[in-house]
Amino acid sequence: MVARQIGELGLNCPLLGELLLEFELIVESQLVEALQASQRSDRRLGTVLIELGYVTEEAIANSLQKQQEMCNGPQLLGQLLLRHHQVTQEQLQAALHESKQSGQLLGEVLVARGILAEEDVRDRLLEQFWRAKGFWVIA
């Protein structure tokens, strides 16, 4: 996969078309056709690909999510817990403070405080792992 290096962080930030090719959702000739149509009409690539019937809106949304994650780096456990509404910002801040003071892991603090069950922490850690590997699909 061809990837762009961003800033000094050196994060891999692939273009949408590159991701769609990598995920085998389109073939190169479809990408070329859609890019040409996109440039002629000043429409976004994803919109053109959907209009041509090459991909679904869901495929574009999933690919854009993956692109965002790759460009922004891995998601932290706290961010995932907030996204899933499993903790409040206040609970997270307090647990992070305690984690820093005690040396315990964030998940351990949240379980000890009774905010989360061990299974909840495990599920988010698995999500974090698979997102970082590029295998997390938004349902």
Image (cartoon, rainbow, N blue to C red):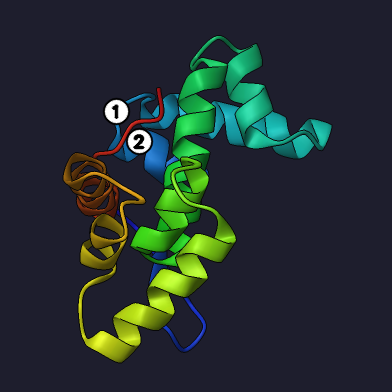
Residue depicted at x 36% and y 24%: 25
Considering depth in this image, is 1 or 121 the residue closer to the camera?
121
Please state the horizontal and vertical placement of residue 28, each as a whole percent of the image. Answer: 39, 32
Q: Could you tell me if residue 8 is visible in this image? A: yes
In the rendered image, residue 4, in percent from the top left (x then y), is placed at 44, 67
Amino acid type assigned to the residue bearing label 1 in the image: Glu
In 3D space, how far apart are the residues under numbered discs 1 and 2 (Cα atoms)? 5 Å
The one of 24 and 125 positioned closer to us in this rendering: 125
Residue that numbered label 1 is attached to: 24
Please give left or right for residue 14 compared with residue 47 in the image: left
Residue 94 to residue 38: above or below? below
Residue 79 percent across, percent down from the top left? 46, 58
Name the residue that disc number 2 marks. Answer: 21
The residue closer to the viewer here, 10 or 79, is 79
User: Looking at the image, can residue 5 be seen?
Assistant: no
Vertical placement of residue 102 versus 36, above or below: below
Q: Residues within 10 Å of mark 1 (few under 14, many from 20)?
A: few
Q: Residue furthest front?
A: 113
Label at residue 43 = none
Above or below residue 55? Residue 69 is below
- Going by the numbered disc 2, the residue's amino acid type is Leu
Name which quarter of the figure residue 101 lies in.
Answer: bottom left
Vertical position of residue 48 compared to residue 16: above or below: above
Quarter of image, res 106: bottom left
Instruction: Give me the residue at 73% from left, 39% from top.
Output: 39
* Residue 29 place in picture, x, y as percent: 43, 27
Q: Disc 1 vs disc 2: Cβ atoms closer than 8 Å?
A: yes
Neighbour class for label 2 at 10 Å: few (<14), some, many (≥20)?
Answer: some
Q: Quadrant of the C terminus?
A: top left
- The residue at the point 40 percent across, 29 percent down is 138
